[in-house]
Amino acid sequence: MLQLPEPTTSCIRTLASVEEAYELCRKITAKYSKTFYLGTLLMSAEKRRAIWAIYVWCRRTDELVDGPNASLTTNETLDQWERRLEAIFVGYPHDHYDVALVDTLEQFPLDIEPFRDMIAGQRMDLYRSRYQTFDELELYCYRVAGTVGLMSTTVMGRDETLPTAPWDQPKTNNPIDEAIALGIANQLTNILRDVGEDASRGRIYLPLEDLALFNYTEDDLLKGVVDDRWRALMAFQIQRARKFYALAESGIGALSEDARWPVWSALMLYSQILDVIERNDYDNFRQRAYVSKPKKMVALPIAWLRAKVL
Ligand SMILES: CC(C)=CCC/C(C)=C/CC/C(C)=C/CC/C(C)=C/[C@@H]1[C@@H](COP(=O)(O)OP(=O)(O)O)[C@]1(C)CC/C=C(\C)CC/C=C(\C)CCC=C(C)C
Ligand SMILES: Nc1ncnc2c1ncn2[C@@H]1O[C@H](COP(=O)(O)OP(=O)(O)OP(=O)(O)O)[C@@H](O)[C@H]1O
Ligand SMILES: [Mn+2]
């Protein structure tokens, strides 16, 4: 669905207009992520469409190693994808979706480095299916999700009334660690939600050192054993993810005012997945932790209040 026919070099004029390209990106964001799409609807029109363009680039990058054709993806495929990224950054779109990203790059001062780092994260998925320590997992999470925090923050903008220097100031307008923390928190949540699906593909993202700490084995995980060892392990992972959410929360006030409500919303909606895992008594193998639409809607006014007050 995300793989359009490759245009030949002579058909550049057949590419979508900027408006059409953003509309394609909007549709894909709406289809693939109800949570983040809802967040974008709370943004200004310019920021929202830029986030859609970024979402689609991230989604496609992820699909290369995680999608239906992932078995065809090699290091060379990702090299090519990176060359294409470089072309986008100098204003050359390769297909309809790229047209939106090229326009976004003209509107916002995005850095190429987080995009490259995300490709490096997807490369890890090509050759690795186990993480020994949390440090190793954290690097993966930074690359595939912390980077999204950096890209999004550039689009959403910072509160220009706050100081930029860290000394003597309780709060500065450069919430880099906090933006990365929200990406990592989301990715850890995603890993906990999808633990069964990943195991069925032979992948274990949970650090093996944590499994050992709770006397739970890889074999138990691949079989989907839910017992007190698993519940304790899950409670530990949830607590860790919540620490990252807490750090992220402390940075939202440093974003431009109109970005705070969308970010609080996305944070609250995604972190609720952790509450659902708890309510399901940690059986994330057999029950998908899912936040219903009415529950998502209830969170929005609370997020609005937090954006105004905190
Ligand atoms: C509201 C808002 C700003 C949203 C940003 C939306 C965006 C551009 C998302 C990109 C997501 C994406 C496709 C990344 C590729 C790698 C990947 C799959 C990461 C996982 C995302 C889950 O997405 P999805 O639900 O579509 O995938 P599944 O269907 O579950 O497979 C991740 C969990 C990572 C998402 C990370 C973020 C959205 C970063 C959030 C951080 C900020 C917005 C920074 C806020 C700033 C401060 C100071 C706190
Ligand atoms: N239990 C499920 N079984 C099969 N498909 C599902 C299930 N839950 C969701 N889906 C589909 O898979 C897609 C991705 O699901 P996901 O849980 O990521 O929901 P989402 O609405 O994208 O929320 P989020 O943004 O929180 O990831 C959804 O668009 C949905 O159509
Ligand atoms: Mn999703």
Image: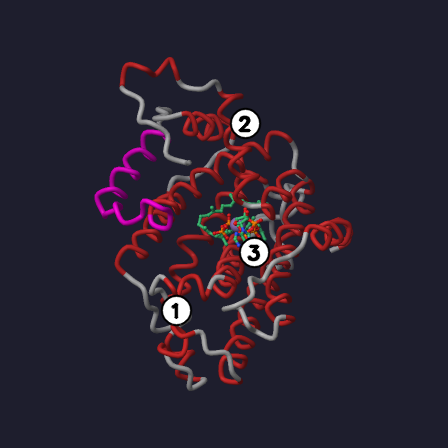
Residue 77 magenta: yes
Q: Amino acid at mark 3?
A: Pro
Classify mark 2 as within 8 Å of ligand 1 or not, answering yes or no.
no
Residue 307 seen from this side: no
Q: Foreground mark, 2 or 1?
A: 2
Mark on residue 135? 1
Classify mark 1 as within 8 Å of ligand 1 or not, answering yes or no.
no
Task: State how far apart marks 3 and 2 are (Cα).
Answer: 40 Å
Residue under label 3: 166
Q: Amino acid at mark 2?
A: Glu
Disc with the residue nearer the chain's start (3 vs 1): 1
Q: Which residues are magenta?
A: 65-89
Residue under label 2: 23
Residue 45 seen from this side: yes
Viewport quadrant of the N terminus = top left
Q: Image check: 256 left or right of 130?
A: right
Helix or strand or loop: what does disc 1 sit on? Answer: helix
Residue 126 magenta: no
Q: Main secondary structure of the magenta part?
A: helix
Query: 132 or 203, which lies in front?
Result: 203
Helix or strand or loop: what does disc 3 sit on? Answer: loop
Residue visible at 63% across and 49% down in the picture: 263
Residue visible at 33% across and 65% down in the picture: 202
Q: Dot 2, crowdedness within 10 Å: few (<14), some or many (≥20)?
A: some
Residue 176 percent across, percent down from the top left: 51, 52
